[in-house]
Image (cartoon, rainbow, N blue to C red):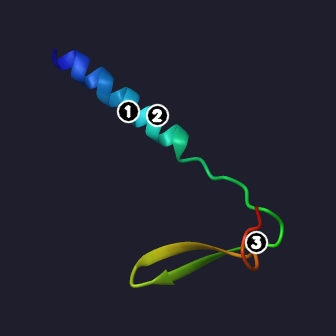
Amino acid sequence: MLMRAAIISLNALVATSAAAQLQSFPEGFRSHDIETNGVVLHVRVGGSGRRSS
């Protein structure tokens, strides 16, 4: 039973890290890293106006 729980936990970890891959942003977006209070904020800035349907 313990082995089964370990295998399930490992599968969940692998699935989570695969889903956490970075996606590319359209041209015109910029990346910034802001360091504050010992934390790094990864920020994307870009786009304009409302999204048209």
Q: Which residue is mark 2?
A: 15
The disc labelled 3 sits on which kind of residue?
Answer: Phe
Circle 1 sits in a helix, a strand or a loop, which is it?
Answer: helix
The disc labelled 2 sits on which kind of residue?
Answer: Ala
Q: Which residue is mark 1?
A: 12
Where's residue 44, x and y in %? 65, 72
Q: Residue shown at 23%/23% (left/top)?
A: 5
The relative height of residue 38 versus residue 25 in the rendered view (above or below) is below
The residue lying furthest to the bottom in this view is: 36
| Mark 1 to mark 2 CA distance (whole Å) | 5 Å
Mark 2 vs 3, N-terminal side: 2
Marks 3 and 2: in contact by CB < 8 Å? Answer: no
Q: Badge 1 local density, few (<14 within 10 Å), some, or many (20+)?
A: few
Q: Nearer the viewer, residue 28 or 17?
A: 28
Which of the 4 image quadrants contains residue 12?
Answer: top left
Left/right of residue 2 with respect to residue 50 in the rendered view: left
The relative height of residue 29 versus residue 10 in the rendered view (above or below) is below
Which of the 4 image quadrants contains residue 28?
Answer: bottom right
